[in-house]
Image (cartoon, grey):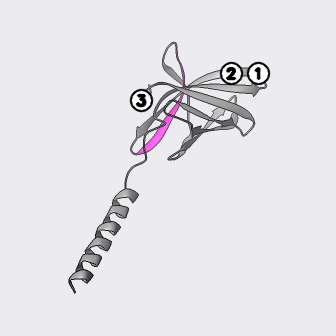
Amino acid sequence: MKKLNVILAAMFALLLSFAAQAQTPPADYFTGKWKVALEGTPGGDQTMFIELTRKDGKLTGGAFDPKTNKLGITFDRVEETPKSVTVYFKASGVDVFMNLDKQDDTHATGSMMDMFDAKAERVATATPVK
């Protein structure tokens, strides 16, 4: 009987540890400012700067001008997983999406519209988007 109680207690503790892990909020890997190099766009290679912040538990943000630190494009939607992020926005009246996958602590790679390669490098940690 004593062994049964120990086994049941161990199983209960294991279940509690899984429940605690399931409720852990997503890591904030993608929050902060990123320099994104886009290769092969119709206008040639481009560089854009994006900032992502966590607001009310969700990622939000946009593209900004690094000289003025002013937000130029606001993301319509941001979808995230622990290892990737996809941002949706309008550029020149066209719906655009860009996905980035975590590579290491300061780099991510992906694509824009599944056509143009994107390489991102962290340039700063999160600050509020203006």
First in sequence, mark 3 or 2: give its number. 2
Q: In the rendering, at what x and y percent does residue 66 appear?
A: 52, 17
Of the 4 image quadrants, the one containing the N terminus is bottom left
**Disc 1 to disc 2: CB gap under 8 Å:** yes
Of the 4 image quadrants, the one containing the C terminus is top left
For this orientation, the residue located farthest to the left is 2
> Gap in Å between the C-alphas at discs 1 and 3?
30 Å
Q: Nearer the viewer, residue 10 or 15?
A: 10
The image shows a total of numbered marks equal to 3
Q: In the rendering, at what x and y percent does residue 81 appear?
A: 52, 48
- Residue placed under numbered mark 2 in the picture: 46
- The span picked out in magenta is 56-67
Q: Which quadrant of the figure has residue 63?
A: top right
- Residue placed under numbered mark 1 in the picture: 43
- Residue placed under numbered mark 3 in the picture: 126
Q: Which of 119 and 95 is in front in this view?
A: 119
Q: In the rendering, at what x and y percent does residue 50 appear?
A: 54, 28
Q: How crowded is mark 1: few (under 14 residues within 10 Å), some or many (20 or more)?
A: few
Residue at left offset 70%, top offset 32%: 117
For this orientation, the residue located farthest to the top is 67
* SS of the residue under disc 2: strand
Residue at left offset 29%, top offset 71%: 10
